[in-house]
Image (cartoon, coloured by chain):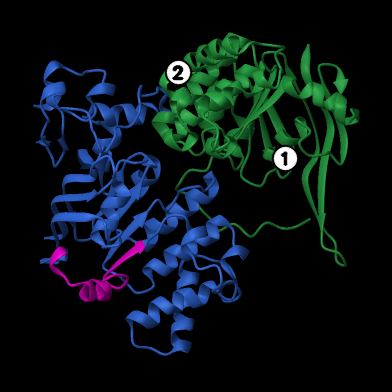
């Protein structure tokens, strides 16, 4: 069964008072994500892929359309109901350091979901044990627990984010370019870790990136987005051969050889 | 003859925990009309190396060694002589155009400023040449864009402005620091083409973590790790026949080459590992790698690698 169902989702922005300018960020898209599946969302910057991720978690309100999470239409839920649902869906952002409170020690950040009693009542000892367990799961050392985010590298901070998310035990994760600010050798570490955690905890994932090579590693199916629309969805589990036509032919595969100046983006 | 020959360059910074050895005994030669890519990950010292050449490091930095540019040691120049050279003879395309451009000056004026500073000409001529440079950087509607402020331009456009500005004084040596950082694939492809075309026939040091971009632009590639060079060779040899385990690991960790991570983290520049800087992460590490510090070993055809496997 699908955990996520999206039907004809739209998001329009307007700006200006007298001469209103409208931008259509998401232009009527529909897709679903199976439980335990990873859907890759790939497209160039400005195609609306980040907006889709935010809409799915209802961090922003859609203009129209339906988003069903585990059978419930979340676009109609009230504040309190939504709040109850939130722990089940989480987001990983691009820049790990800005996602962590700079004045909190790493251990405190990871323990926060427990302290907020998202996982029921726990004693301090229990919290400590769980934090150390998570630190180990994501490949950090116990000594990191007492450090601050600025004392860790980008890759280590992204591991902290993953530990904190696992503390919440979500079912659905939106990962928006989670390795865009990391070095390649660290990127490989973090992506491998995410793949392993997804398998281990049966996580459902929307993985957003502009890098087709990364998407290919991280996704069971791949949705290609262009100008606010999903123009193709293909299976990635079968061999590479299945992934061809649209992806290769469209702008996604930009070799370094053929360039032409792009015109500034038109405002609809 | 080499355009720039760097001999035993050391750039150190004081810190409460001891000196940070960001550049440690680096030897590097860049020939006339040669474009050299300096590849490395965050904190390996590659930007400090670039800044050392053009003397843009904070006063606390200690820079030692020799940097022979057109027969003259750059370290012997007075600050005033260096100031005259900087931007004219040797230009730098800085990273992060968003923070490197002046937000309250129109981009055309910023480029004109460079031209006026280094060539005797009036404001109007400088402005006209600035527009010409923007055109050369393939900015559509260059006249209109010249009158805009940096925040009105997209990331790719700002990078084009940085390139136009760097090349405006017709320098004979260019240092480009991460010119493709933070750009999406299409924009990156365009910027790579632009740099390749605009720097053809010039000498350049391109500092980057983007091996694909360096591969498209550069004739040779040097790999930096923990403040040292580990490998240097023609672009073709680095991409197809890397000798150092770090270079091999770096390439294998690329998403297009299998996404196989290198375990561990980058070394500290204050307290680097004993012996070979890479040995704690190296799959082939031997006993000698922990004890002794390997030297650059020349292999065939200008290829060299700092590894006991090549001894």
Left or right relative to A119: residue B201 = left
Does residue B254 appear in this view? no
Whether residue B79 is in magenta: the answer is yes
The residue at the point 32 percent across, 40 percent down is B40
Q: Which chain is green?
A: A
Q: Nearer the viewer, residue A69 or B167?
A: A69
Left or right relative to B68: residue A2 = right
| B50 is higher (above) or lower (below) than A177 | below
Colour of chain B, in one word, is blue
* Residue assigned mark 1: A51
Left or right relative to A66: residue A31 = left
The residue at the point 15 percent across, 33 percent down is B306
Magenta-highlighted residues: B75-92
**Figure quadrant of residue B163:** bottom left
Separation of disc 1 and disc 2 at Cα?
31 Å
| B207 is higher (above) or lower (below) than B263 | below
The residue at the point 54 percent across, 18 percent down is A195
In the image, residue B94 lies at what x, y percent? 40, 59
**Figure quadrant of residue B41:** top left
The quarter of the image holding the C terminus of chain A is bottom right
* Residue assigned mark 2: A139
In the image, residue A30 lies at what x, y percent? 80, 30
């Amino acid at each position: 069964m699908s955990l996520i169902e999206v039907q004809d989702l739209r998001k329009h922005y307007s700006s200006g008072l007298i001469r209103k300018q409208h931008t259509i960020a998401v232009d009527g898209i529909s897709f679903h994500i199976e439980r335990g599946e990873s859907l890759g969302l790939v497209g160039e910057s400005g195609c609306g892929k980040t907006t889709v991720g935010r809409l799915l978690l209802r961090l922003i309100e859609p203009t129209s359309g339906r988003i069903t999470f585990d059978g419930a239409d979340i676009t109609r839920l009230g504040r309190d109901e939504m709040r109850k649902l939130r722990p089940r869906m989480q987001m990983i952002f691009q820049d790990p350091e800005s996602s962590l409170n700079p004045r909190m020690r790493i251990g405190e950040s990871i323990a926060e979901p427990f302290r907020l009693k998202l996982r029921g009542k726990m004693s301090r000892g229990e919290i400590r044990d769980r934090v150390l367990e998570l630190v180990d799961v994501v490949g950090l050392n116990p000594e990191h627990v007492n450090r601050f985010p600025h004392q860790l590298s980008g890759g280590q901070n992204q591991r902290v984010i993953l530990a904190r998310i696992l503390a919440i035990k979500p079912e659905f994760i939106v990962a928006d370019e989670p390795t865009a600010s990391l070095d390649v050798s660290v990127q490989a570490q973090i992506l491998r870790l995410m793949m392993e955690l997804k398998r281990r905890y049966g996580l459902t994932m929307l993985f957003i990136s502009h890098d087709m090579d990364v998407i290919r590693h991280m996704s069971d199916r791949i949705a290609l987005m262009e100008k606010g629309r999903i123009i193709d969805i293909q299976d990635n589990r079968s061999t590479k051969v299945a992934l061809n036509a649209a992806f290769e032919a469209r702008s996604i595969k930009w070799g370094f050889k053929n360039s032409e100046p792009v015109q500034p983006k038109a405002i609809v | 003859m080499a355009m720039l020959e760097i001999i035993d360059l050391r750039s150190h910074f004081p810190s409460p925990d001891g000196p940070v050895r960001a550049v440690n005994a680096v030897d590097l030669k860049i020939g006339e009309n040669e474009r050299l890519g300096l590849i490395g990950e965050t904190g390996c010292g590659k930007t400090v190396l670039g800044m050392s050449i053009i003397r843009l490091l904070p006063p606390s930095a200690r820079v030692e060694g020799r940097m022979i540019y057109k027969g003259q040691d750059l370290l012997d120049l007075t600050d005033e002589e260096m100031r005259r050279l900087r931007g004219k003879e040797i230009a730098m395309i800085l990273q992060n155009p968003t923070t490197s451009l002046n937000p309250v000056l129109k981009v055309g004026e910023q480029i004109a400023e460079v031209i006026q500073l280094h060539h005797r000409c009036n404001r109007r001529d400088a402005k006209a040449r600035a527009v010409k440079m923007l055109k050369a950087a393939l900015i559509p509607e260059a006249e209109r864009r010249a009158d805009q402020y940096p925040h009105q331009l997209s990331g790719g456009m700002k990078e084009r402005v940085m390139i136009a500005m760097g090349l405006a004084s017709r320098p004979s040596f260019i240092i480009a620091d991460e010119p493709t950082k933070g750009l999406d694939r299409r924009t990156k492809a365009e910027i790579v083409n632009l740099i390749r075309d605009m720097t053809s026939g010039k000498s350049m040091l391109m500092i980057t973590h983007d091996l694909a971009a360096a591969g498209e632009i550069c004739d040779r590639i040097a790999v930096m790790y923990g403040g040292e060079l580990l490998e240097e060779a023609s672009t073709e040899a680095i991409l197809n026949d890397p000798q150092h385990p770090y270079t091999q690991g770096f390439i294998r960790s690329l998403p297009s080459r299998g996404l196989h991570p290198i375990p561990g983290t980058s070394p500290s520049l204050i307290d680097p590992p004993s012996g070979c800087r890479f040995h704690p992460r190296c799959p082939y590490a031997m006993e000698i790698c922990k004890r002794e510090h390997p030297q650059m070993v020349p292999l065939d055809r200008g290829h060299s690698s700092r590894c006991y496997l090549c001894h």
